[in-house]
Image (spheres, grey):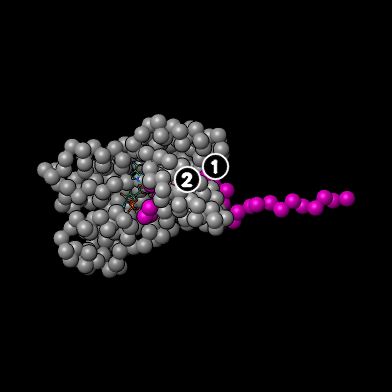
Amino acid sequence: MSQPRKKQNVRAGRVAGKIILVSGGASGMGAAHVTRLSEEGGTVYLADRDVERGKQLAAELAARQLDVRFVELDVTDETSWRAVASLITNEKGRLDVLIHNAGVLSLSSPEEATDEEWERTIAINQTGIFRGTRALMPLVRLGRSPSIINISSIFGLIGAAGYFAYMASKGAVTLMTKSMAATYGPEGIRCNSVHPGYISTPMLEQEMRGLPAGSAEAIHGQIPLRRFADPSEVSAAVLFLASDEASYVSGAEIVVDGGLLCCR
Ligand SMILES: NC(=O)c1ccc[n+]([C@@H]2O[C@H](COP(=O)([O-])OP(=O)(O)OC[C@H]3O[C@@H](n4cnc5c(N)ncnc54)[C@H](O)[C@@H]3O)[C@@H](O)[C@H]2O)c1
């Protein structure tokens, strides 16, 4: 006699079954990526140094039956990355998608920037990717159709007045990604950079507070789509790169900027 079939908890979606880590997942675009990727069937580690916000978002998504767990991470700290690597090793034994999203803004020119501001910006935006990649590569190698996504910026592609340390860090992310694509491509690991334009997040609010009045309207006028973006519009590009639909996309710069750079 045939046994009644056990109901299996198989998730549907464009990244169903994938194990994913998003650094800086507690706020802004990171939070949008965590949300969308988990809605698309991924198991997502929301990694952030902001424990309160990270735990709260993870709990909200878990309450919707989405597979999200918070893990505390300071991307500048080697020990912190090692702890995350060891947790994922014990729980899952592999990592399919690594998203380096954590970042901070710096608006200063070379003469305005303090040593502390320079070092903090480089440590988080640039060195964080180095340390995180080094710590997690053994797990990514064991991943299924692995993909690494580094969040750079339009300011990793073009110049603007000020933003000195920020551009130094984001320009580095652009080329670090190409080095990673060339290094890990032969192992079937794809590496791409994403270059958001002006996206409505707490970081953009901070940026607008640091610019002269009327700047937001002036910037809108330079963007062909005439508006800032919702974070979910960047998540759509991240989702594509994380999914197997991007199976032949590596070393690419995916610009999500409402057309801003096409006019420069
Ligand atoms: N908002 C924009 O317009 C814009 C444009 C281009 C690129 N970006 C980039 O997109 C990424 C996300 O930016 P956002 O606008 O969502 O910013 P945000 O400030 O809303 O979120 C950044 C997140 O990173 C986390 N974080 C910062 N330092 C960390 C550290 N040391 N360790 C772990 N987590 C840390 C914060 O706690 C926060 O949750 C950043 O890399 C940013 O540079 C943003």
Mark 2 CB in 8 Å range of ligand 1?
Answer: no
Residue type (three-letter) at the residue carrying disc 2 = Phe
Does residue 207 belong to the magenta stretch?
no
The residue at 41%/34% (across/down) is 80
* Crowd band around label 1 with a 10 angstrom C-alpha radius: few (<14), some (14–19), many (20+): some
The disc, 1 or 2, on the residue closer to the chain's N-terminal end is 2
The residue at 23%/51% (across/down) is 158
Q: Can residue 100 be spotted in the picture?
A: no
Q: Where does label 2 land, which residue?
A: 70
Nearer mark to the viewer, of 1 and 2: 2
Please give left or right for residue 132 compared with residue 10 in the image: left
In x, y percent, where is residue 115?
18, 37
In x, y percent, where is residue 241?
44, 51
The overriding secondary structure of the stretch rendered in magenta is loop
The residue stretch that appears in magenta: 1-30
Does residue 12 belong to the magenta stretch?
yes
